[in-house]
Image (cartoon, rainbow, N blue to C red):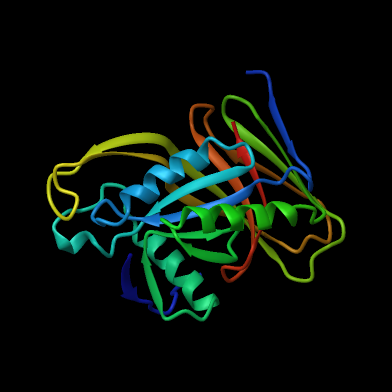
Amino acid sequence: MRQIAASVFAGLMPLLATQVGAQERPVVVELFTSQGCASCPPADAFLKQLAMREDVVALALHVDYWDYIGWEDSFASPEYSERQRGYAKTGERKMVYTPQMIINGEDQVVGTRFEDVTDLIEKHRAQAQNGLAVQVKRDETRVQIRVEAEPARSMPLMVQLVRYIPEETVAIERGENAGQTISYVNIVTEMTPLAVWDSQEPLDLKVELPLDEHAVVVLQYLGFGTIEAVAHLR
């Protein structure tokens, strides 16, 4: 497990339809990882297993703070490093590390503690009935999103479109993982805020998204709070 001090977060065709009701809400697992982290490959491989589950949305967010040790992560973004630090600040933790998994924006766990991760997923599956329903429809160029809440929430939710690459293999030439060829899955490439929703009325959005792009819609309390709903755009 690699650690670094946390900083204060700065900055806040025919239609294909998917409906996500309260009982079938998947659990979001975010893995903070790095190609330059020797401890990360087992967690990367475990995320691949999680990505095969219908009841889990598994996302890999590659951080950039290990790039200095000899290998620049080809998927890394400072945005994902700041997201991880935002979670640390919200959870009153002084450190961030890789590999770290965040479960539904609420619980954090070392990404190689597979049994603990599985237990946390089961914990959140048991809490799935939360009164939020997300419906998404897409054609060749755009996505229509409708969200309803019963009852309305007391705090607003950030609605985000998270684009990702399903899988890519990287030959690592330098750094701690030099000589290894590692496959990564569900690699986040962009997190786009769509709306801040107060949930008092249903939310309707239309977003440009070509049919060949992969994405999920995530609803999360502002300030790196819990993830309350997610819908996969398949």
Residue 87 seen from this side: yes
Asked if residue 2 lies left or right of residue 179, the reply is right
Whole-percent x and y of residue 167? Answer: 39, 34
Residue at 25% over, 38% down: 170
Give the position of the N terminus as an image quadrant.
bottom left
Which residue of the protein is positioned furthest toward the front in this rendering? Answer: 115
Asked if residue 141 lies left or right of residue 174, the reply is right
Residue 228 seen from this side: no
Residue at 61% over, 68% down: 225
Asked if residue 99 lies left or right of residue 74, the reply is right
Whole-percent x and y of residue 32? Answer: 41, 57
Q: Nearer the viewer, residue 215 or 131?
A: 131
Whole-percent x and y of residue 214? Answer: 51, 35
Give the position of the C terminus as an image quadrant.
top right
Count of numbered labels shown in the rendering = 0
Residue 119 picture quarter: bottom right
Asked if residue 200 lies left or right of residue 2, the reply is right
Compared to 19, does 41 lie above or below?
Answer: below
Residue at 82% over, 54% down: 131
Which residue of the protein is positioned furthest toward the top in this rendering? Answer: 13
Whole-percent x and y of residue 127? Answer: 74, 57
